[in-house]
Amino acid sequence: MVSSTTTSLAELGNTVFGGGGQKFASITAATGATEIVADSTNHRIRVLALVLTQIGHTSTASVKFHSNDDDDAATDLTGAFGTKGSDMVLVLPFNPAGWFQTAVDGSLNITAVNTAAAGFLVYELVAGT
């Protein structure tokens, strides 16, 4: 029974959520802009889950995610997530529809202000037009 469930879940991940299955990326971002996932030709990067924590404790820190296209023009994907007090922990639980996604051919980037950040994300590549 376990093997049939495991097989079904693997097939579900490869067919329902974008066709390519889920991928994983580590986040290590110094202050400033950092590329998390490089662009993939004719695809969007859709973030399905995320855990992020602040490194360095300051109450004026924030992070936001953005997409960069081939001309390196940045498009904000989220607003700035700020700290409350001295720590920031951002958790976006698994969402099969995705929390946000890049433009077609855009890379996924994070900008950290007055802090460094670390964590991981689950994403998928979605065919774009």
Image (cartoon, rainbow, N blue to C red):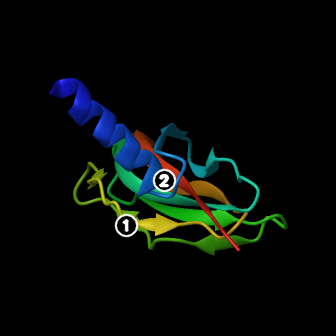
Q: Residue at x 76, y 71 (%)?
A: 73
Q: Residue at x 69, y 68 (%)?
A: 104
Residue under circle 1? Answer: 97
| Quarter of the rendering containing residue 47 | bottom left
Instruction: Classify the position of the N terminus by image quarter.
Output: top left
* The one of 119 and 87 positioned closer to us in this rendering: 119
Judge whether residue 115 can be spotted in this image: no
* The one of 12 and 127 positioned closer to us in this rendering: 12
Q: Is residue 69 left or right of residue 120?
A: right
Instruction: Classify the position of the C terminus by image quarter.
Output: bottom right
Estimate the spatial distance between the alpha carbons at disc 1 and disc 2, rounded to whole Å: 31 Å
* Secondary element type, mark 2: loop
User: Percent x, y for residue 113?
Assistant: 51, 57
> Between disc 1 and disc 2, whose residue precedes?
1
Q: Residues within 10 Å of mark 2 (few under 14, many from 20)?
A: some
Residue under circle 2? Answer: 114
Q: Residue at x 24, y 31 (%)?
A: 4
User: Percent x, y for residue 21?
Assistant: 48, 45
